[in-house]
């Protein structure tokens, strides 16, 4: 779109890491406003409205109800009443909906099952709901339409700078790419690449999925414990609960919700909705992801800034780290601006804030598509799906949405076999690989 020849190399599947394991929210961050990070909130608030404009199928306005309780003085109703009006203004006065507030009686009437014990009232404000993996994939489809070369399951192993960068890539075969500029935008892996100068502090966040009938929220509900914030988020016929925010030093590729994580989220949900009596057996599925935060060893994980950094530790090597899902487009724009200026390439204006992400939308939305052979064929032929979990998890979210995902995967594997030419042995191995993935680690998920 700006006259650059671009290639993307991804060591696993596209959106395998953090980009498919978020809270699925496009938000300025009401918590960051309380922390005084006005610039970050303004930046993200503007970006969520841009994403709503260029990709409306992946950016639905979502009202949030933030109740306050006498027993938690960290969140005062009068402060939130002022804050949500400021929140609207930080979107340039064009938020996805207008904020308001309710007294205790109105709040209980509005939110079915919410605890009335110590309830003082609530504010109601707007952010957006997305599908994080679909946002990645539709962005890649747009990039491909504009000439980008995209490779998944291809790992960057080393790079050497001569007149240009010589990058060694390991995929089904080994090969070398020559390029003028390298951008390291690898999330939790960013500080492990050769030549990287990134320093990260990784924190883990988990989410649980339950039947919406078990927690029938129509708006997203903010749930608090001290200064910590969790959400109950309506997602089609399901409700998403999360998230945690704890330091992490384990495997980057195998990040799961452990029993303590699950019990913590359920405890907070039950404190706010005591009649729900949610238990582990109610959990359909869970996911866990890592936040690649810019290193700050002081303070609690939830207090660390979600701002991003773009730095060039070596000529024509760029590290892009930190940031939020909501600001993904802005991070890309700023990165390209910086590398164009540094390499003295012809300047061209960025149009991604105005041009629709896709000219036509196929099998993409916030909730999972219908389970059909046509959808599976599309993902294999047009969206780079190579393995069963590529389709079940990142292309569709069927893995998280359906209790009988294991049985559905058998049917999906037969459709993929027809498209990709798998024999019986490959199909069996794909099922074994997929069925080895936990739905909820250390917990029984079926009734």
Image: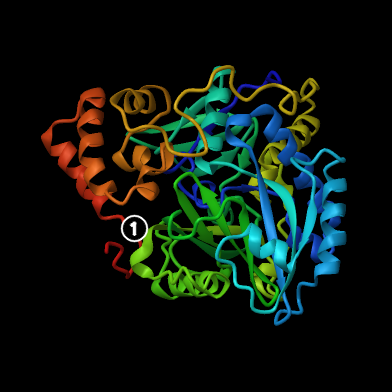
Q: Residue at x 33, y 66 (%)?
A: 281
> For this rendering, which residue is in front, 333 or 263?
263
- Is residue 215 positioned above or below 73 on the image? above
Q: Is residue 307 visible?
A: no
Q: Residue at x 73, y 80 (%)?
A: 70
What residue sits right under mark 1 in the picture? 439
Q: Residues within 10 Å of mark 1 (few under 14, many from 20)?
A: many
- Is residue 198 positioned above or below 392 on the image? below
Q: Residue at x 79, y 21 (%)?
A: 348
Secondary structure under badge 1? loop
> For this rendering, which residue is in front, 151 or 273?
273
Q: Is residue 114 left or right of residue 44?
A: left
Place of residue 183 in the rendered image (x, y in percent of width and height, measured from the top left): 63, 39
Place of residue 318 in the rendered image (x, y in percent of width and height, measured from the top left): 68, 43
Q: Is residue 128 left or right of residue 193?
A: right
Place of residue 35 in the rendered image (x, y in percent of width and height, measured from the top left): 80, 66
């Amino acid at each position: 779109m700006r006259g650059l020849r671009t290639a993307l190399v991804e060591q696993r599947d596209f959106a395998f890491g953090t980009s498919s394991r978020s809270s699925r929210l496009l938000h300025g961050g009401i918590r960051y406003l309380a922390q005084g990070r006005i610039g970050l909130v303004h930046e993200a608030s503007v970006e969520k409205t841009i994403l709503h404009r260029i990709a409306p199928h992946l950016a639905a306005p979502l009202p949030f109800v933030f109740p306050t309780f006498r027993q938690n003085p960290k969140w005062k109703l009068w402060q939130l009443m002022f804050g949500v009006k400021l929140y609207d203004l930080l979107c340039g006065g064009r938020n996805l909906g207008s904020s308001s507030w309710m007294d205790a009686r109105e709040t209980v009437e509005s939110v079915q099952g919410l605890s009335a014990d110590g309830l003082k009232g609530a504010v109601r404000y707007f952010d957006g709901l997305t599908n994080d993996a679909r946002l990645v994939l539709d962005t890649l489809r747009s990039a491909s339409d504009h000439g980008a070369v995209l490779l998944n399951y291809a790992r960057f192993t080393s790079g050497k700078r001569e007149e240009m960068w010589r990058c060694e890539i390991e995929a089904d075969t080994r090969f070398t790419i020559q390029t003028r500029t390298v951008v390291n935008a690898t999330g939790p892996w960013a500080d492990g690449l050769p030549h990287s100068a990134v320093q990260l502090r990784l924190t883990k966040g988990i989410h649980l999925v339950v039947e919406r009938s078990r927690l029938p929220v129509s708006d997203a509900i903010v749930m608090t414990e001290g200064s910590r914030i969790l959400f109950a988020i309506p997602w089609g016929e399901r409700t998403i609960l999360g998230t945690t925010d704890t330091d992490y030093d384990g495997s980057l590729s195998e990040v799961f919700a452990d029993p303590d994580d699950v019990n913590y989220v359920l405890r907070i949900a039950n404190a706010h909705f005591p009649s729900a009596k949610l238990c582990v057996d109610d959990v359909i599925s869970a996911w866990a992801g890592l936040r690649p935060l810019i290193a700050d060893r002081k303070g609690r994980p939830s207090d660390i800034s979600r701002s991003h950094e773009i730095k060039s530790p070596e000529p024509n090597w760029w590290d892009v780290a930190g940031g939020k899902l909501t600001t993904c487009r802005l991070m890309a724009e700023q990165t390209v601006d910086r590398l164009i200026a540094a390499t003295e390439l012809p300047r061209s204006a960025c149009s991604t804030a105005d041009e629709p992400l896709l000219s036509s939308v196929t099998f993409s939305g916030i909730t999972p598509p219908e389970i059909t052979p046509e959808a599976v064929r599309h993902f294999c032929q047009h969206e780079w799906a190579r393995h069963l979990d590529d389709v079940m998890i990142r292309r569709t979210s069927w893995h998280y949405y359906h209790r009988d995902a294991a049985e559905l995967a058998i049917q999906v594997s037969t459709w993929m076999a027809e498209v990709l030419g798998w024999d019986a042995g490959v199909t069996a191995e794909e099922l074994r690989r997929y069925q080895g993935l936990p739905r909820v680690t250390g917990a029984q998920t079926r009734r």
